[in-house]
């Protein structure tokens, strides 16, 4: 299913055109949206993921209803992608999209519109009747079918219908482009958020109604960031890919959003999240780490029990279509007309939306600086600037641009010549390509942008003339067009110098640079982008079938084994298993329901229950020691033990040499002083360095450096080992670890610990074992239990806490401590106390309104 940026506006009251024969915007098994869309892709030959693509269709208008449907301008690359999926691949495809704002000009509400001059839709709630909607949908579907496409339109009603895009365009778009709004009371943003949630839920409803197992759902852009998680909750096994066409800011900027957690969680419902560049991908991963606290790698994020792949696939253009469209009689005619207007002039061209991120003001500043620095060239160079209206009207920008154009022309212009030609309008395709072909230089000075397709189209149009392109380093395109001349748009002098160098570059140098740029643009096309994205997604999906993937704990199987067993042994890690990992380790206290669960386990005489933790004796004694005398405790990864039925602690390292601790503390102190937020925890038999409060990336880097330092010094002198945990390093004696404790507990298991008079005195090993842990120190337990021949492996349940993709020697996995409480609590008849993670937590907020 494809969710693509579409805007189907009903603004023309009469003379409605029929669907265009240029089908390039819808895709099958997919979803529609006004500035985003989702497409569902399914292969007609197989329900399993198989690389092909999605077909697509684009309704540009419908007839017989007072309704006109338009594609959003400025998304030609995306429309070309859908056209490619439709014509040239084997995937069947359904495009799911919002119809956009509907304005009915019939007599029923004509009076309301007339009474509200300047309004393009009535302020009162407006909706089509059932028959009108059915007719509109039928027309859209039928016209799309004539072009070989399948669509599933979404109708949304309620007052000013632009409300459905308000949060995305008034809050998300500015922040993604590093624009901070003015402080406010947040009431309007709160209402926008509710509409944003409803908008995404409408897409989820539509997709679920047409979804078939095996479909691939492709979600596009920032209007639908909640959709992947909404779909994941309803369709747990769905194949979902998300592509963000906009930039993604640094975590320090993204965290300004009040709904940051919900948006990130929504995106992480996808199997793969893809962005325009590697830098945007790094920013996204960093946000997931810093805002959500999720573990990550350079190309993935562990979220809600699965590993979400994070990739970068820069979008391209349909180079073949551009080469076809740029060489028509109409284009050549316009080229001659432009040359006649500016005979002997070197032409600089710019085409941008008139908003604050496209850098039009910076471009004019740089051109004025060029005129100041090279006055002899003023009459020889002309800047033709085309500005299209922004999605949200920005009067200040428009006024500033007009003033700057007037100023430059007033200072450097003459009666027969004006150096800046500004056209604040949309221009026809033939005029556009003619301008790109005659221009000597394309000047793009965006202060923040994702993929700038004008630069790519200019490169194709200059295949023979070899004009150069100056590109802002703050665009996503700069990372792809590495042979373009990149500039800092804020550096007016630097841009002015670049203009001069490009205009007077040698023909040979121009030819060489153009050849490199042309090869890149014509090989990294929109078609290759689609193929690469789907190939990457299919590869990610295929990894979920690998043999190393750990299955989720079979709770009925465990319950049956538990109920039939007479001698049971439980071994639980503490942090990350019985309680979530938190920033402050001292705050990780056991939940009352967990305490109740442990108490109930201990009350059963058939059970032996042990907490095997890295915590010290004092902590375990204080918070767990009073639960039951039949609860065994092991502190500092097995260095100390308090056996069942006693209150005395046994020091297993009593005879060990502890002089190594001073060397370790000195090294830890060195890194603590250089890592803000880190601290040292000294235990009796181990020393731990925590960096959970530090910057995640820097903390991890310092931990690697510290580990290398320890392994090259302390471990060479003493019989100790360095253990890596979750945001910590621990040094402890090598001969004591959790694996040795697990082995010891099994070997020493005896009915002397049981008060069951009917217990079989000959039995010395348990016939049911449950061992749970979440990090590398717990892998010692899992390995030790796997090697023990005397126990029944069929009734031994080793469970790692974390995603199924985590490499482990455990047999099963659970997602988080909530699932642990749910699974173990079921053994003793407790209610479900799990709070499912991954919830967007939007329903309660909506209800609160």
Image (cartoon, rainbow, N blue to C red):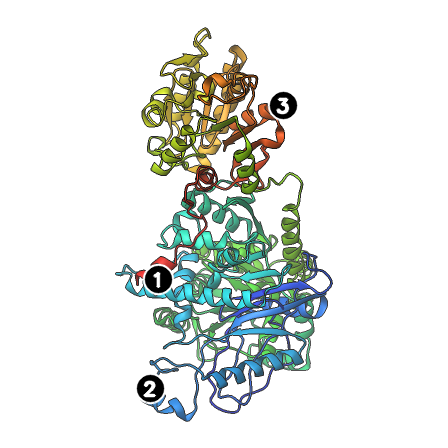
- SS label for mark 2: loop
Residue nearest the viewer, comparing 254 with 162 = 162
User: Residue 153 sits in which quadrant?
Assistant: bottom right
Q: Is label 3 or label 2 in front?
A: 3
792 horizontally vs 474: left or right: right
Distance Cα–Cα, label 2 vs label 1: 33 Å
In whole angstroms, how far apart are the C-alphas of marks 3 and 1?
53 Å
Q: In which quarter of the image is the N terminus?
A: bottom right
Q: Residue furthest right?
A: 45
Q: Which mark is residue 835?
A: none
Is 469 positioned to the left or the right of 107 in the image?
A: right
Q: Which of 815 and 724 is in front in this view?
A: 815
CA gap, disc 3 to disc 2?
A: 81 Å
Is residue 150 shown above or below 564?
A: below
In the picture, the disc for residue 787 is 3
**Label 3: which secondary element:** helix
Does 696 appear above or below 306? above
Write down the residue under mark 1. 846
Work out whether residue 180 can be spotted: no
Compared across the picture, whether 160 is left or right of 300 comes to: left
- Of badges 3 and 1, nearer the viewer stands 3
Q: How crowded is mark 1: few (under 14 residues within 10 Å), some or many (20 or more)?
A: some
Q: Mark 2 points at which residue?
A: 117
Q: Residue at x 34, y 88 (%)?
A: 112
Assess whether mark 2 and mark 3 are in contact (beta carbons under 8 angstroms): no
């Amino acid at each position: 299913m494809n969710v693509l940026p579409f805007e189907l506006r009903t603004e023309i009251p009469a003379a409605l055109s029929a669907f265009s024969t240029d089908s390039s915007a819808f895709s099958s098994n997919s979803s529609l949206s006004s500035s985003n869309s989702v497409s569902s892709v399914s292969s007609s030959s197989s329900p399993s993921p198989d690389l092909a693509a999605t077909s697509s269709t684009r309704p540009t208008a419908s007839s017989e209803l007072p309704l006109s449907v338009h594609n959003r301008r400025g998304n030609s690359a995306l429309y070309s992608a859908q056209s490619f999926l439709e014509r040239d691949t084997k995937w069947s495809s359904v495009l799911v999209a919002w119809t956009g704002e509907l304005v009915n000009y019939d007599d029923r509400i004509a009076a309301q519109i007339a009474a509200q001059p300047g309004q393009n839709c009535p302020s009162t709630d407006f909706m089509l009747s059932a028959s009108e909607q059915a007719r509109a949908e039928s027309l859209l579907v039928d016209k799309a079918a004539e072009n070989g496409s399948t669509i599933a339109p979404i109708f949304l009603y309620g007052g000013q219908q632009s409300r459905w895009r308000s949060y995305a365009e008034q809050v998300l778009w500015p922040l993604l482009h590093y624009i901070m709004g003015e402080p406010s009371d947040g009431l309007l943003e709160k209402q926008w958020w509710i509409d944003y949630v409803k908008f995404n839920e409408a897409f989820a409803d539509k997709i679920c109604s047409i979804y078939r197992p095996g479909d691939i759902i492709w979600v596009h852009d920032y209007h639908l960031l909640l959709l992947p998680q909404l779909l994941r909750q309803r369709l747990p096994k769905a194949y979902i890919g998300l592509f963000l066409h906009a930039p993604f800011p640094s975590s320090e900027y993204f965290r300004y959003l009040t709904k940051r957690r919900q948006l990130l969680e929504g995106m992480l419902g996808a199997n793969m999240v893809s962005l325009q560049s590697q830098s945007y991908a790094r920013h996204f991963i960093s946000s997931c780490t810093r805002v959500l606290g999720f573990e990550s790698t350079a190309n993935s994020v562990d979220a809600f029990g699965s590993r979400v792949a994070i990739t970068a696939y820069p979008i391209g253009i349909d180079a073949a279509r551009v080469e076809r469209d740029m060489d028509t009689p109409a284009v050549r005619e316009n080229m001659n007309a432009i040359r006649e207007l500016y005979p002997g002039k070197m032409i600089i061209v710019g085409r941008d939306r008139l908003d604050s991120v496209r850098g039009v003001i910076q471009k004019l500043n740089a051109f004025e600086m060029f005129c100041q620095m090279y006055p002899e060239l003023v009459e020889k160079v002309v800047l033709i600037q085309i500005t299209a209206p922004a999605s949200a009207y920005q009067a200040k920008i428009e006024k500033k641009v007009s003033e700057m154009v007037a100023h430059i022309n007033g200072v450097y212009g003459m009666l027969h010549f004006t150096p800046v030609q500004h056209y604040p309008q949309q221009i026809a395709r033939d005029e556009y390509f003619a301008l790109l072909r005659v221009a000597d230089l394309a000047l793009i000075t965006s202060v923040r942008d994702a993929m700038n397709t004008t630069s790519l189209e200019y490169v194709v149009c200059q295949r023979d003339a070899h004009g150069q392109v100056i590109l802002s380093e703050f665009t996503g395109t700069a990372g792809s067009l590495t042979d373009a001349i990149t500039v800092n748009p804020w550096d007016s002098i630097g841009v002015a110098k670049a203009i001069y160098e490009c205009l007077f570059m040698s023909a040979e140098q121009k030819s060489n640079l153009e050849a490199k740029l042309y090869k890149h643009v014509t090989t990294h096309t929109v078609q290759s982008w689609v193929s690469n994205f789907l190939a990457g997604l299919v590869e990610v999906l295929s990894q979920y079938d690998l043999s190393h993937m750990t299955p989720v704990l079979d709770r009925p199987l465990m319950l049956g084994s538990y109920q039939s067993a007479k001698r049971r042994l439980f071994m639980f890690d503490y942090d990350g298993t019985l309680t979530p990992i938190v920033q402050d380790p001292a705050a990780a206290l056991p939940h009352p329901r967990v305490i109740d669960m442990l108490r109930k386990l201990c009350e059963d005489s058939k059970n032996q229950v042990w907490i095997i933790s890295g915590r010290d004796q004092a902590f375990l004694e204080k918070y767990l020691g009073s639960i039951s005398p039949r609860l065994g405790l092991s502190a500092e990864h097995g260095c100390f033990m308090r056996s069942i039925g006693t209150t005395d602690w046994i020091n297993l390292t009593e005879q060990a040499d502890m002089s190594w601790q001073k060397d370790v503390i000195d090294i830890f102190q060195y890194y603590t002083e250089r890592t803000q937020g880190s601290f040292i925890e000294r235990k009796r038999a181990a020393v731990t360095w925590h960096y959970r409060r530090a910057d995640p990336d820097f903390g991890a880097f310092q931990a690697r450096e510290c580990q290398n330092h320890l392994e090259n010094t302390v471990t060479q002198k003493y019989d100790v080992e360095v253990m890596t945990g979750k945001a910590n390093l621990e040094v402890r004696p090598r001969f004591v670890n959790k694996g040795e404790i697990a082995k010891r507990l099994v070997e020493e298991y005896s009915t002397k610990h049981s008060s069951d008079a009917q217990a079989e005195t000959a039995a010395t090993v348990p016939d049911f074992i449950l061992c749970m842990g979440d990090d590398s120190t717990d892998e010692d337990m899992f390995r030790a239990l796997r090697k023990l021949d005397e126990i029944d492996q069929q009734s031994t349940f080793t469970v790692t806490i974390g995603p199924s993709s985590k490499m482990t020697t455990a047999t099963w996995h659970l997602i988080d401590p909530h699932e642990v409480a749910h699974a173990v609590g079921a053994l003793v008849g407790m209610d479900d106390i799990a709070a499912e993670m991954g919830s967007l937590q939007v329903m309660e907020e909506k209800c609160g309104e």
